[in-house]
Image (cartoon, grey):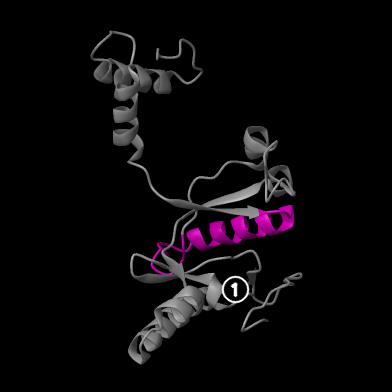
Amino acid sequence: MQAPPVLDDASLVDKWDAHFEYFAKDFPGYMTEAEFKKFCDMQYGRKIQVALKFMRREEDYTKEVEVRRLISTRGHVSKYMLNMLPSPSPDEFERAVGSLSVNNDQLSLADFKHVLVLPAADRSLEDIFFKERPSANLIRFLLEEAAHALRLLHSWDIMHGDVKKLNFVRVKHQLKLIDLDAATVMNTLMGSKFSSGVLPP
């Protein structure tokens, strides 16, 4: 693999040249696959598990991204919210995998080109309740975590709009709130959301 000869950003060119020079041990000006993987591990971290949220409607996707951006301006909230990772734009996603289909070719990924990338969770609160049979103390703790997450949103005048056990997930022993496509600023119109939420608006 050879360093790309032309890039518009001079500072980026210098940065890449320095990286290639440092990692290209076997052949000057070239990086082997192993060297490139080592560079990626150091630059971007090792593999992480992620979850992809596929959305059909652009309106839902835009709403969730806008609410997440609004929340991110309020400070560090990752204790109670599942943060969004860098995600492809709808056009990038459609170009990359738009021709693929799932569910025995019944669903085209081109119809779900609005994608959010999120850290993978261990389980949803729904799964914890049905599969782990939590003790009374654990149930109390989980409900407190859920209440703290909702109180944080409400303190910023944001309403979740679709509270249910599936929209709380456990990540590294912490309960986090997800699925913000129905969220809205209080005293504004929410639109519509079809859901089995236990606390619908």
Please tell me whether residue 136 is drawn above or below residue 189 in the rendered image: below
Please tell me whether residue 125 is drawn above or below residue 25 in the rendered image: below
- In which quadrant is the N terminus drawn? top left
Q: Residue furthest front?
A: 104
The secondary element bearing badge 1 is classed as: loop
Q: Amino acid at mark 1?
A: His
- Residue at 35% over, 85% down: 138
Which span of residues is magenta-colored? 55-82
Confirm whether the magenta stretch covers residue 176: no
Percent from the top left, x then y, of residue 191?
76, 69
Percent from the top left, x then y, of residue 173?
33, 70
- Residue at 72% over, 42% down: 110
Report whether 126 appears left or right of 97.
left
User: According to the image, label 1 marks what residue?
Assistant: 160
Report whether 20 appears left or right of 58.
left
Confirm whether the magenta stretch covers residue 65: yes
